[in-house]
Each structure stands twice: as C-alpha cells, then as structure tokens.
Image (tube, helix red, strand yellow):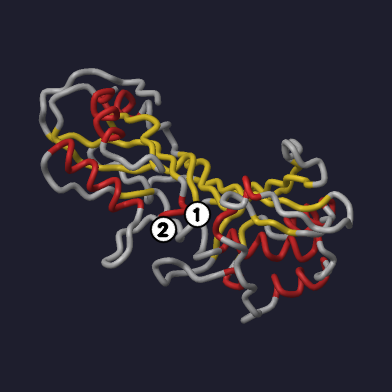
Amino acid sequence: MRVRNPDLTTGSRQSVAARVAWDGSSFHGYQRQPNAFTVQEALETALYACVGTRVAVAAAGRTDAGVHATGQVIGAHVSWRHSLWDLACAWNSHLPGSVAILDVHRVPEDFHPRFDALTRTYEYHVLSHRLPTAPRRWPLQRGACWYVPVPLDLRGMNQAASLLTGTRDFGFLGAAPDGGHTVRTVLKACWERNPAVRGNEELQALRFTVTANAFLFRMVRRMVTLTVKVGRRQLTLADLRSLRDSVGGVTPGPAPANGLVLSRVTYATPISDMWKAGKA
C-alpha cells in the first residue's frame, strides 16, 4: 500500500480518491444492490466504520459479478482529522481480505472518478493447451481465467482484435450503461502470451489487453468471445468484419466473468498530483 500525500488535515470535509484492488469471486459486481453483497457495499461499510458517517463511494467503472480489479479508482467526500496514510490503514482494517485500498490521495472537490476518466484498461486471462492433447484443468487458476481446452491461434486472435479498434459504433457488442449512444473509441486491443503456468507445461497462459475511452455493458467479454472464436477457427476474419459492420447484428455471448480484470484508469492529471495542480 502506498499513500503519497500523507499530510495532516484540519478535519474539514475533503475529497479523496483511492485505487482499489479486489478478488471478485465473492461479490455481485461493484454497484450496491438491495439483496446481494457488492464491492461498493464493502467499501462504504468499512468507510463508515472509519469516519462515523454514511459516505457514498463513486467508481470509475461498474463491474459485473465475478470480475476482478487491480486498478479501480474510487472517490468520496470525507471528514477526517488524521493523515491520508492513517485513513488508508483504517479503511483497510475494516475491509474483507478480498478487497484492498492501494493508495489514497486528496483531489479537487469536483473530481468524479467516472466522468473525469480519460481511459479504462481491462485485461482478460485465458488458459489454453499448447498441443491438441487430452485436456487437463488447472484448479489453482480457475477463479482468475477462462479455461479453453484446445490450442488457440494467437496470430489470428490479434488480427481479429485489430478489427475491433478505432472509433465506431460498437452496439453489436453491448448496450450503454446509461442507455445512451454506443459509439466508443478503442485505442488498443491485443493478445499476448504470459509466462508458462508453473507445474503444468501443457497449458499456455494468454492475456488480452484492451484500452478505450469507455466500454459498453459486457463489451470486453464479448470482444474476448469473438477473438477466441477466431483463435479456435470457429469464426473467420471476414465473418467478424461483417458482424462489426452490420446494423442490428447478433450480439455474441460474453466470455466468463472470472477472467476479467479492471487494471487501470487514467486521467488528464494523475490522481496523486490533482490536489497540487488544483492549488497552483
């Protein structure tokens, strides 16, 4: 855990931003729900235990049930008399072990983690077989990846991913969370090999990384589905191009949630520098 601006405050209400990581296996997504335990509920309950008042915690992105995070950004308005280092430590002490505050920073009063974000980056993890041998699962990874028991054509998957970049209407991949337009700008989409899985050389770890200004509902997981279909030679690049360019095309089913990780959110000014920049 790192807190780069641990200056003592006067105890007055202030705006803070934090980076958060969590294992999504036991959560029903980020956003608070009436009959299910969510990451937002865990964060707000723990923060209440620290500051003694109910505080809403906004996030840069809403994730589905089972989705993980290593770089989600949240924001809240709190009254706190001690250092931000103390706030981070106190907040973590009341959180379940599956959630961690990574760092906390003071930010301008009007900061909003979602509306001020420039880009979001997600990663998706897949385990596949190097050779067409008898499939064998790897239980240690099952909560953090999609197991595909056949070899995958990495070159073809990257060709497919390249068709899903640029500024265009991505309505064939999902709906907008707020019911708005479905035009998005995908800046990067690529597959790469990860280090071999320890203890099982038959398996190949693959990682899909995608960065965009914003995403549609389950958009990343549908991108994974389509590119893996190309990798399995179940879908041609021409088929994918036709689906992409069609109006009212059939929306593919999403890949499993457990392979997806929200890894990074960027802003015009890093959250660690926002307060200093705003006072200059």
Quarter holding the C terminus is top left
> Between 186 and 8, which is closer to the camera in this rendering?
8
In-image side of 146 versus 113 (left or right) = right
Residue occupying image coordinates x 43% and y 70%: 180
- The percent position of residue 192, horizontal first and vertical second, equals 74, 43
Label 2 sits on a secondary structure element that is loop
* 242 or 204, nearer to the observer: 204
Residue that numbered label 2 is attached to: 29
Left or right: residue 55 versus residue 240 is left
Q: Verify CB contact (< 8 Å) between mark 2 and mark 1.
A: yes
Residue type at the position of mark 2? Gly
Secondary structure type for disc 1: loop
Residue 31 found in image quarter: bottom left
Q: What label sits on residue 24 in the rendered view?
A: none
Question: Which residue is depicted at the point 35% across and 36% down?
Answer: 18
Mark 1 residue type: Val
* Foreground of the two, 277 or 163: 163
Position of residue 4 relative to residue 141, above or below, is: above
Q: Position of residue 23 (x, y in %)?
A: 46, 46
Which sits earlier in the primary sequence, circle 2 or circle 1? 2
Q: Which mark is residue 67?
A: 1
Q: CA distance from mark 2 to mark 1?
A: 7 Å
Q: Nearer the viewer, residue 137 or 85?
A: 137
Q: Residue at x 37, y 51 (%)?
A: 115
Q: Is residue 58 left or right of residue 233?
A: left
- Quarter-of-image position of residue 161: bottom right
